[in-house]
Amino acid sequence: MSNSSLIAIFIALGMLVWLLSGDITNEVVIADDAVSTETEASESDGDRDAVQVVRALRSEASDRKIYLAVRGQTRANRTVDVKSEISGVVKQLPGGKGRFVKTGDLLCEIAIDTRRSDLSQALADLKSAQLEYDGMRDLNKRGLQSEVNLAKAKASLEQSRFRAKHAELALQKTRILAPFDGVVEAQPVEVGDFMSPGASCVTLMEISPMLVVGRLAERDIGKVALGDTVKAQLITGEAYDAEISFIGRAPDQVTRTYLIEATIANPAESIRTGLTTNMQVPTGTEVAHLISPASLVLDDEGLVGVRIVDAENRVRFKTVDIVSEGAEGVWITGLPDTVDVITVGQEEVFEGQVVKVDYAPLTSLVSK
């Protein structure tokens, strides 16, 4: 066989091999594609069959007191200018400024001068008038004295009694006593000053109990009642429970607000007057849920709410209103009385999705 024939045969065999290799490759690729498609379909079916697991808390709504924040201040229960009823020179001032005094303690003493002798004279005149009247009455019974003279003797006796009582009170009033327990806030006189009737000896404040005063708007004044408990937080940090003891009947003509007063027990007399106070005034009750702040989510429109699980284990979004928050959690309204709130996984589920629920312990939140 010639060389040219051999070359032609080899070329023909090469072309045949090349054609056959193309068909085999296509069959392999098609087979691989079929296997890949089947695998993906199988994985998709598996994803559809998988159920998302979330953790939820069954929340029960409870009655919660509604408090209105009111800015107020402390005030003495009463403040009195203790005044003199007589004139005279101040002899001593044992009730010094800043001193705590009890009922009946001496605050100021005025010089007695002639008041003791005036009392002795008045008592002597009274004794004489009594003897004269007794004699007149005895004679009248025996018909030896007229009714007119007896009446004059009785009038003289009454005048003597009045003068004796007046002299006795004048002597007593040289000692000005504390009308109640309190602290001496001011002392406008000094030893040696001359006091006239009506002049102030000291200013006495009763600070046990103490008052917290504030003002409520017209729309809120009807929501409070005498005896309600107010939470009072002083600017100095102390917190107290106070009881509403007064609710004003007439509004301030400028602000149209009503005065309220709450009484704080102050046995240690440590609370000062004029301290700024934040008052939490109860104005009613509402039904609300206590949840963790971490359970709150936003929907596509930016509304605040929570994701819950319905009776069919489907995820639902519920908008809520936050009424208050504190260390114990967040109080919200807008939910049914009993609801399953998703606490873990709420960001990974969507509306209408069927989920498997793992309930959180009921002790995770404590209602107050």
Image: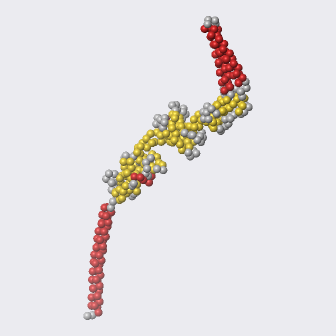
Residue shown at 64%/7% (left/top)? 145
Q: Considering only vertical position in the picture, is 199 above or below 4?
A: above
Residue at the far left in the pictured view:
1
Residue 49 visible somewhere in the drawing: yes
Which residue appears at 65% of the width and 38% of the height? 99
In front of the other: 297 or 302: 297
Along the horizontal axis of the image, is 165 left or right of 301?
right
**Image quadrant occupied by the N terminus:** bottom left
Would residue 4 appear left or right of 269 to someone viewing this image? left
- Image spot of residue 287 (x, y percent): 41, 43
Query: Disc count in the image?
Result: 0
Image location of residue 6, percent across then percent down: 28, 91
Q: Is residue 308 left or right of residue 327?
A: left
Q: Residue at x 53, y 36 (%)?
A: 261
Is residue 215 visible in the rendered image? The answer is: no
> x%, y% of residue 310?
34, 51
Query: Furthest residue to the bottom?
Result: 1
* Residue placed most toward the observer, 207 or 308: 207
Q: Quadrant of residue 62?
A: top left
Residue located 34% across and 57% down the image: 356
Which image quadrant for residue 53?
bottom left
Nearest the viewer among 2 and 112 is 112
Residue 173: x percent and y percent?
A: 66, 27
**Along the line of sight, the residue nearer the viewer: 85 or 113:** 113
Please say which color scheme the image uses.
secondary structure
